[in-house]
Image: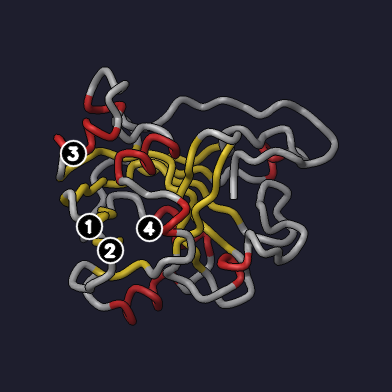
Amino acid sequence: MAGSVALQRFLARPVLDVAPALLGAVIEHHTAAGVVAVRLTEVEAYAGPGDPGSHARNGPTPRTAVMFGPPARLYVYFSYGMHWCVNVVCGPVGSASAVLLRGGEVVRGLELARTRRPAARQDRDLARGPARLASALGLDKSLDGAALGGSRSSSAVRLRRSGRVAGEVCTGPRVGVSGVGGDAVRYPWRFWLDGEPTVSTYRPGATRSEPGRDASP
């Protein structure tokens, strides 16, 4: 999507409309070292307050403030004290909706992505999973709250939507949070492209009565 205004308009819609529409889109990070671009094949939707899997379920905090702001911003958080994960803020101001970028295919900057992900055995594993995707793109806490631009913008991180998605869009429970309030049944909000080798492996969360983990936004 070329213009930032058009991108904001696209992302200002309800999260369950935005999330599947991001499949096939390309996210790029421009740095002094070069550009890495990833075609998105897997995402998850989080609806903010009222969603037991969301970091924003209990309202705004200094950490989640960006989620309550305007759409087309990045929410970057540290997961399990080891990995960065990246989300695109969407919906109207105050909704705290976000889409977790779970997996994708590196379509530009393959060599740079390999240097950032030396443990990846195959190219399909470079951005297969949210932590790997963030690492391959070179996204970390310094980008938390950063503006997401259109393909012709000057933003460091840009989104280019595809005109048509190849493959069937599948839905299912979110990864790692299925133990929260019957998440697997009530929130089948993971979306992925069928048959894509870059889609991560589904792992349910441990059953518990109270949410308290950091696997999702």
Pointers 3 and 2 in contact (C-beta within 8 Å) = no
Residue 67 or residue 116, whichever sits in front:
116
Residue drawn at (77%, 59%) of the image? 58
What amino acid type should be assigned to the residue bearing mark 2?
Ala
Q: Which residue is mark 4?
A: 21
Image x and y of residue 124, in percent? 26, 27
Alpha-carbon neighbours of circle 2 within 10 Å: few (<14), some, or many (≥20)?
A: some
N-terminal of the pair, mark 4 or mark 2, is 4
The local secondary structure at tag 2 comes to loop
Question: Please, which residue is most extreme toward the top here?
Answer: 121
Q: CA distance from mark 3 to mark 4?
A: 27 Å
Residue 204 x %, y % = 62, 27
* C-alpha gap between disc 4 and disc 1: 23 Å
Quarter of the picture containing the N terminus is: bottom left
* In this view, the mark in front (4 or 1): 1
- To which residue does mark 3 refer? 112
Separation (CA) of disc 4 from disc 2: 22 Å
- Dot 2 or dot 1, earlier in sequence: 1
Q: Are marks 2 and 1 in contact (CB under 8 Å)?
A: yes
Quick one: SS at disc 3? helix
Question: What residue appears at the point 31 percent right and 26 percent down from the top-left corner?
Answer: 125
| Of 44 and 80, the residue lying toward us | 80
